[in-house]
Amino acid sequence: MISIADAFGDRSVLDMSGDNLELHHQVDGEVSKSNEAKLEDFLASTSSATSRADILNILRTRLTVRFAEDTGCEGVLWGDCTTRLAEKTLAETAKGRGFTLPWQTADDNSPYGVSFNYPMRDLLKKELVAHADIVSPPLTSLISNRAPQVSASTKNTTIDELMRQYFESVEENYPSIVANVVRTSSKLRAPILQDTDRLCGLCRMPVAEGLFGIHGWGGDQEAMTLSTDAGSSQDSEGKLCYGCARSLSNSTALRMS
C-alpha cells in the first residue's frame, strides 16, 4: 500500500519535471525529517481546510501517476462516479482550477503523460452502493460511504465537503441534475498539448501564457511564484496556476531547488 506521505520520499512525486518542491522550514539543528513529518509540516503551513484538502488531492493524483509510470501502465482508471464527477466539477471551478476540467472529468490523455479514464462516469453513487450491497460477496467495503463532515464553522469546512453534501442530497430526488452537470462538463474539450506549454509548478496542469498566479487572472495581488535559486526566479517551472496560488497564498513551506 502506498501512503500519501510517500510524496515526500526519495523519489518525490514533486520532482517529476524538474520542479523539486521541498519543505524548507526545519527545527533548529534538525538535518532531516520523516516523510510523515514533512507532510504534516506542509499541510500545517496552509491557511485553510480547503487548501489542505486541495493539496492532498494534488499529491494523491501525482503519486498515482508516478506509480502508474513505475509499473509501466499506459493509463489510470479512476473510480469516480457521476456524483463524484459533479462534485469535482463545481469544486474545482470554485477553487479557480476550472480550466483543468477537460482532463479531470473526461476520458482523454492527461498532461501527466498517461491517459485518464472514468469507466463509472454514468453511474450515480446511490446506484453503486445498491449494487455493491446486493452482490455476493458484498462489495460495500470498496465504496467510500463517509458522510460529508460539514462543520458549524465555515473556516473548518472545505469546498469539497460542501459539494459532496449538496450532490449527495440532490441525487436522492433529482438525479437528472447531477447527470446534467457531468454531461455539461463533458462537452469541454482539452486543448492539444504542445511541448512548449507552460505547466503549473504544483499541480502540473498546462496554464495559458500570462495567466499564472492570482495577478494573471486580473486580481490585485502579484503573480505568485515558488522561491527559486538565484537567476531562475522567472522560470515558468516555478509558477503556480490560479488555484494552486490560492491554496498556497500564505504558505512558506515550499521552495524550488
Image (cartoon, rainbow, N blue to C red):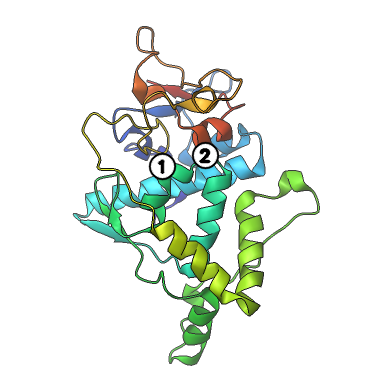
Label 1, secondary structure: give it.
Answer: helix
**Marked residue nearer the N-terminal end (2 or 1):** 1
Query: Residue 77: percent from the left, percent from the top?
Result: 32, 63
Q: Does residue 231 sit above or below 158 in this rendering?
A: above
Label 2, secondary structure: give it.
Answer: helix
Q: Tell whether label 1 touches label 2 (CB within 8 Å).
A: yes
Q: Does residue 234 sit above or below 124 in this rendering?
A: above
**151 relative position to 12: left or right:** right
> Is there any visible trace of residue 144 in the rendered image?
no
Separation of marks 2 and 1 at Cα, in angstroms: 8 Å
Front residue of 250 and 13: 250
**156 relative position to 182: left or right:** right
Front residue of 94 and 236: 94
Q: Residue at x 36, y 26 (%)?
A: 209
**220 relative position to 232: left or right:** right
| Residue at numbered disc 1 | 7
Query: Residue 196: percent from the left, percent from the top?
Result: 23, 28
Q: Badge 2 local density, few (<14 within 10 Å), some, or many (20+)?
A: some
Q: Residue at x 54, y 27 (%)?
A: 214
| Residue at numbered disc 2 | 39
Q: Residue at x 41, y 69 (%)?
A: 121
Front residue of 129 and 2: 129
Q: Quadrant of the C terminus?
A: top left
Q: Given the image, on which type of amino acid does mark 1 rest?
A: Ala
